[in-house]
Amino acid sequence: MSDSAYARIKKRHPNRIPVVVTCDDKLSLSKCKYLVQSDLTVAHFMAVLRRHLVSEISPEQGLFLMIGNRMSCGTTTFGTIEHELFGADGDRDFVEAHLSVENTFGHDRMLS
């Protein structure tokens, strides 16, 4: 997205951060663009993403959110993430996140 689109969004919503979320082939979201409050934590954003999931995930699968090719702590705010990605005076752009699902919690049938 262009700098002018980012500038227009930040002018209209100064306390929000534009986030674009992509998904694995196994997942689909009802929407992929979000305006996130700068004080929203990664854990709260994951809860929002779970509500927007179109595809169902099984209980033994876990969701993982990668922002800037790394996983952030659940208590990290998006204001902090934006500052780490783009710096105080750096060129700003939309925060890009990737949502994936993995089998992590095992399965009951494996125990029998």
Image (spheres, rainbow, N blue to C red):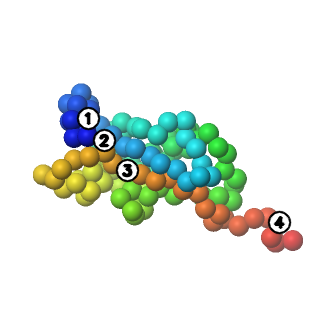
Few, some or many residues within 10 Å of mark 2 (<14, 14–19, 20+): few
Q: Secondary structure at mark 2?
A: loop
Q: Nearer the viewer, mark 2 or mark 3?
A: 2
- Horizontal side of residue 102 vs 112, given as left or right: left
Residue that mark 2 sits on: 1
Q: In the rendered structure, are the residues bearing label 2 and label 4 in contact, judged by CB atoms less than 8 Å apart? A: no
Q: Are marks 3 and 4 in contact (CB under 8 Å)?
A: no
Relative vertical location of residue 17 with respect to residue 60 in this rendering, above or below: above
Q: Secondary structure at mark 4?
A: helix
Residue lying furthest front: 2
Instruction: For the C terminus, give its image quadrant.
Output: bottom right
Q: Residue sitting at 35 percent across and 55 percent down?
A: 76
Residue contact between numbered discs 1 and 2, judged by CB atoms under 8 Å: yes
Q: Amino acid at mark 3?
A: Glu
Mark 3: give few (<14), some (14-19) or many (20+) Cα within 10 Å: some
Dot in front, 3 or 4: 3
